[in-house]
Image (spheres, helix red, strand yellow):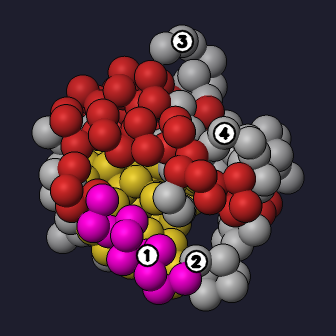
Amino acid sequence: MGKGELRVGGITPLTTIDYPGELAAVIFCQGCPWHCRYCHNPELLPPRGEAAVPWEEALAFLRRRRGLLDAVVFSGGEPTLQVALADALKDVRALGFKVGLHSAGIYPRRLVALLPSVDWVGLDVKALAHRYPDITGVPGSGEPAWQSARLLIESGVPHEMRITVDPALTRPEEVRRIAARLQAMGAERVVEQPRRG
């Protein structure tokens, strides 16, 4: 993937829930091509945001947190949208942190290319493939998401498949079917997360 500066829409300095078992900071990457009806970070959808944090400033913050944090998680938005993510992952790993990635699996090939640079992935699984457009507003969005799930499972990279549960959009029976399918594919861990926002 290429050069350029990562567009950062915000930073959470400390979290215990975004990377299981680790004290982490979260770097929120700006931009997402989907418009999920329950998006809890709508300010991160545009390619450029009003609360931009220069990448060098984010790195300076992380340098000061060495010895205090275990990991850095790249979230969004959709981090894999940005070609600069590959270099950012290397920058963070060079500081000695574990690297986590939150993704919706929008770009399977990009995700696979990044996997050697990450230690853990939280992959959002929103629905069965044919139901994705009802949530994302994007035709055909389910196929790449489920392809990403398969490729992540096959990679052996530690991961968590997170099913977002919105009672207005996802019936309990569908949630059970999603979880069963992911487990049959060999998913390491499948969790349900309530919609936020």
In magenta segment, residue 180: yes
Cβ–Cβ under 8 Å for marks 1 and 2: yes
* 47 versus 122 height, above or below: above
Q: Which residue is mark 2?
A: 170
Q: Is residue 91 left or right of residue 164?
A: left
For the C terminus, which image quadrant?
bottom right
Q: Which residue is mark 1?
A: 175
- Amino acid carrying label 4: it is Gly
Q: Residue at x 41, y 61 (%)?
A: 25
Q: Earlier in the sequence, mark 2 or mark 4?
A: 4
Residue located farthest toward the top when viewing the structure as drawn: 2
Q: Nearer the viewer, mark 3 or mark 4?
A: 4
The span from disc 3 to disc 1 (Cα, nearest Å) is 37 Å
- Amino acid carrying label 2: it is Thr
Estimate how packed mark 3 is, as few (under 14), some (14 to 19) or many (20 or more) residues with alpha carbons within 10 Å: few
* Helix, strand or loop under label 1: helix
The span from disc 3 to disc 2 (Cα, nearest Å) is 37 Å
Q: Which residue is mark 4?
A: 140
Instruction: Locate residue 42, reporting x and y percent.
Output: 77, 63
Q: Residue at x 66, y 39 (%)?
A: 140
Q: Is residue 172 left or right of residue 55?
A: left
In magenta segment, residue 169: no
Q: Earlier in the sequence, mark 3 or mark 1?
A: 3
Determine which of the numbered discs, if any, sits on residue 2 in the image. Answer: 3
The answer to whether residue 95 is seen in the rendering is: no
Instruction: Locate residue 71, reporting x and y percent.
Output: 28, 54
- Amino acid carrying label 3: it is Gly
Between 164 and 63, the one nearer to me in the picture: 164
Cβ–Cβ under 8 Å for marks 2 and 4: no
The image quadrant that residue 15 belongs to is: bottom left
* 159 versus 99 height, above or below: below
The span from disc 2 to disc 4 (Cα, nearest Å) is 18 Å
